[in-house]
Every structure is written in C-alpha cells, then in structure tokens.
Amino acid sequence: MYKIVAKKVLAPAIKQFQIQAPEIAARARPGQFVVLRIDEKGERIPLTIADYDPKGGTVILVFQEAGRTTMELGRLEEGDSILDLVGPLGKPSEIRRYGKVICIGGGVGIAAIYPIARALKEAGNEVVSIIGARCRDHLFLVEKMGEVSDALEITTDDGSAGRKGFVTGVLQDLLVGEEGIDLVVAIGPPAMMRAVAELTRPYRVRTVVSLNPIMVDGIGMCGACRVAVGGKTRFACVDGPEFNAHLVDWPVVMQRARMFREEEKRAVEDYFLGSECRCRKR
Ligand code: FES
C-alpha cells in the first residue's frame, strides 16, 4: 500500500498527491511515469511523476479529474492509501546541454513539464517556459516554473492572466523573432502538442512531446499504448513516452484518444448515479 502523505488542490479538478513510495522516489527521473491502481477492482492509469524526493522517499503525482478513476482518486484524502503504484516506468527525458530550450506545458501538462524544465536548467540550458491554461484559476506551479526558467510566459484562453490565447501564439513569436532555438519540449493535450509540432516543423527545430495514450500494464506486454512514430509501431510505455513530435502520426494519436470517450462518459454517469440506483441496469 502507498500512503498519501499530503494532498493539495492546485486548480479546479486538478489535484496533487505526495505519496510515500521510497523505491520509486529513489529511481525516478524526469519524464517517467507510474501506473496506479486504487484498489483491487480499479482500472490502471498512468500518471507522470511531477516530482520526487529520494531522501524523503516520496513522489508527487498531479492529476486532472477527467474520468471515473481520476474522480475516485480525487476523493482520497491525506492518510488514505493506494493499492498499487508501479514505476518508475518509461524512458527518462534526454537531459543534456542543448543551448536554448523552450519548455511548454498546457493544462495538467504543466505538472509534467516542471521536472524536465528544472533538469534542463540544471544541465546548463537557457530555459524559456510557456505555460497555458483555460483561465487564471486553472494555472498552477507558476512560481515553481518561474524558479527553473530564465523567462516564463503565461497564456490563458480568456486572457484572465498573461497573454490571451494559446501557448502556440507565444511559441510562434519566439520562432519568428529569435535565432537558435535548439529544442522544444511540449506536454499537454494531444491537440496542443500536435499544433506545436506543426509550428516548429518548418523551422526544423528539434521537438519532443510526451504521449499519454491509454495504458494497461505499462511494461510493453499488452499493446494498449501503441502509437505510430516514423511509420513504425511504438509502445509509449517502453519506447516513450517522449517521441520526436515531427515523426508522430497525429491523426492516429487523436483517434485513439477519442476511442473510449463514450465508455468513459457512461462510467462517469454510473459513478455519479451510485450503487443505490439500479435503473440503468434494468
Ligand atoms: S501499456 Fe501495455 S504495452 Fe504499453
């Protein structure tokens, strides 16, 4: 069992757990993830490791309550425990001195980009970060992102904080206005990562995205997380989750992301109907 030692609400429907998991904390690297199962009947879900403390033996997980399992997870409190936490899984981010790096986090992807931005900064890169959210209330980790960035740009869809619009608006300006961007790393919704890939492609700027498809075992056996990259089938859990954004087959990624939307919607409805209501089963 893995105990939740601290819980924070970062933004509406976005929650952070600090979880006692010494073995994972000792081995975690930026870009890796865990597969979590709340209880014996629970669905397995992958969550990026947003931070880790090897000395304290804890990992930080940030998740958005977007489906039944993440809603169930969000109801757990400090002192509660999670049955399974498997990890760290996936290949760590390739951290080295590139030069000038743009780190982009959209929505809950802000949590995932944070340890990567920090590691890139520690490796001697000039880090410009762009974080984007729906509105001011959905922004989080702003201060921490500022601490690991040489410059931090903020965007909100409604203009309630930072620049009005999407992260791609700022990226476009940087690509047009500045020479020598050596790497772009983007983590967020598939549509955002695809838009970033299309923007940087003509500039031939190396661009890395972290894919988060449906996963089951997380160790390359089940095939649930397959994606097409450079014309080849890859498993995000063992070959990724980071890939060259210009080689990702985006229509397939988008289509697979939508694949279980109806089932997920029904699962959420059932969850809210609760066990007392049997009418849907008759
Ligand atoms: S989650 Fe099963 S192969 Fe990747």
Image (spheres, rainbow, N blue to C red):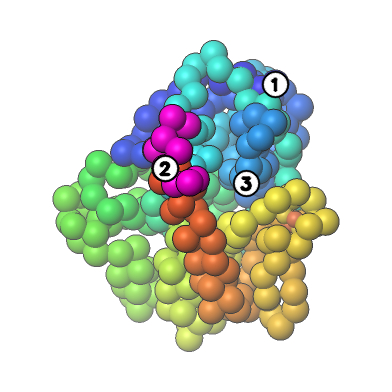
**Does the numbered disc 3 mark a residue whose Cβ is under 8 Å from ligand 1?**
yes
Q: Position of residue 210 (x, y in %)?
A: 58, 59
The nearer-to-camera label among 1 and 2 is 2
Could you tell me if the residues under marks 1 and 2 are in contact, i.e. CB atoms within 8 Å? no
Task: Say if residue 182 shows up in the picture.
Answer: no
Residue behind mark 1: 1
Tell me the residue at 54%/66% (across/down): 259
Examine the rendered structure and indicate whether residue 278 appears above or below residue 248: above
In magenta, the rendered stretch is 272-282
Could you tell me if the residues under marks 3 and 1 are in contact, i.e. CB atoms within 8 Å? no
Tell me the residue at 31%/38% (across/down): 12
Quadrant of ligand 1: it is bottom right
Q: Secondary structure at mark 3?
A: strand
Q: Secondary structure at mark 2?
A: helix
Residue type at mark 3? Answer: Pro
**Residue 46 bears which disc, if any?**
3
Q: Position of residue 90 (x, y in %)?
A: 72, 51
Residue type at mark 1? Answer: Met
Residue behind mark 2: 279
| Towards the viewer: 52 or 102 | 52
Q: Position of residue 27 (x, y in %)?
A: 75, 35
Examine the rendered structure and indicate whether residue 175 appears above or below residue 80: below
Residue 79 is drawn in which quadrant? top right
